[in-house]
Amino acid sequence: MSGSSSVTTIKKVVQQLQLEAGLNRVKVSQAAADWKQFCLQNVQHDPLLTGVSSSTNPFRPQEVCSFL
């Protein structure tokens, strides 16, 4: 690496570190509590828990044509 390219690289690294240092962090325990609350509030809209009605299920078995 030449001198000017290494200086440019180091400046980019320092700029990225300054950006990351300025971010507000959330504790894992708080993030988990928020996620749990979100999941509990939206459980009625989760098709994995409530199932999908047969009329709106695009993967339901197709009916066989009876006149063939």
Image (cartoon, rainbow, N blue to C red):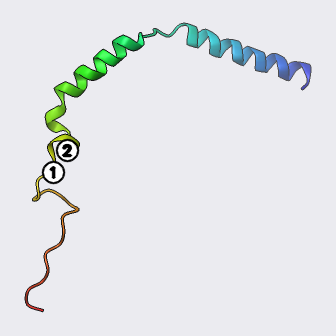
Sequence-earlier tag: 2 or 1: 2
Percent x, y for residue 32? 34, 18
Which amino acid type is shown beneath numbered disc 1? Val
Q: Residue at point 50% right, 10% down?
A: 23
Q: Residue at point 46% right, 8% down?
A: 24
Please, what secondary structure does the residue beneath circle 2 have?
Answer: helix
| Quadrant hosting residue 29 | top left
| Quadrant hosting residue 45 | top left
Q: Residues within 10 Å of mark 2 (few under 14, many from 20)?
A: few
Compared with 51, 30 (above or below) is above
Compared with 5, 60 (above or below) is below
Please, what secondary structure does the residue beneath circle 1 have?
Answer: loop
Q: Residue at point 9% right, 59% down?
A: 55
Q: Is residue 25 left or right of residue 3?
A: left
Q: Mark 2 and 1 residues: CB-CB less than 8 Å, in contact?
A: yes
Q: Residue at point 77% right, 16% down?
A: 10
| Quadrant hosting residue 67 | bottom left
Percent x, y for residue 35? 30, 22
Label 2, label 1: how far apart the Cα atoms are = 6 Å
Q: Is residue 21 left or right of residue 44?
A: right
Percent x, y for residue 60? 18, 64
Where does the N terminus fall, quadrant-wise?
top right
Compared with 6, 46 (above or below) is below
Q: How many marks?
A: 2
Percent x, y for residue 30? 34, 11
Q: Is residue 16 left or right of residue 40?
A: right
Which amino acid type is shown beneath numbered disc 2? Pro
Q: Which mark is residue 47?
A: 2
In this figure, which residue is indicated by the disc labeled 1? 52
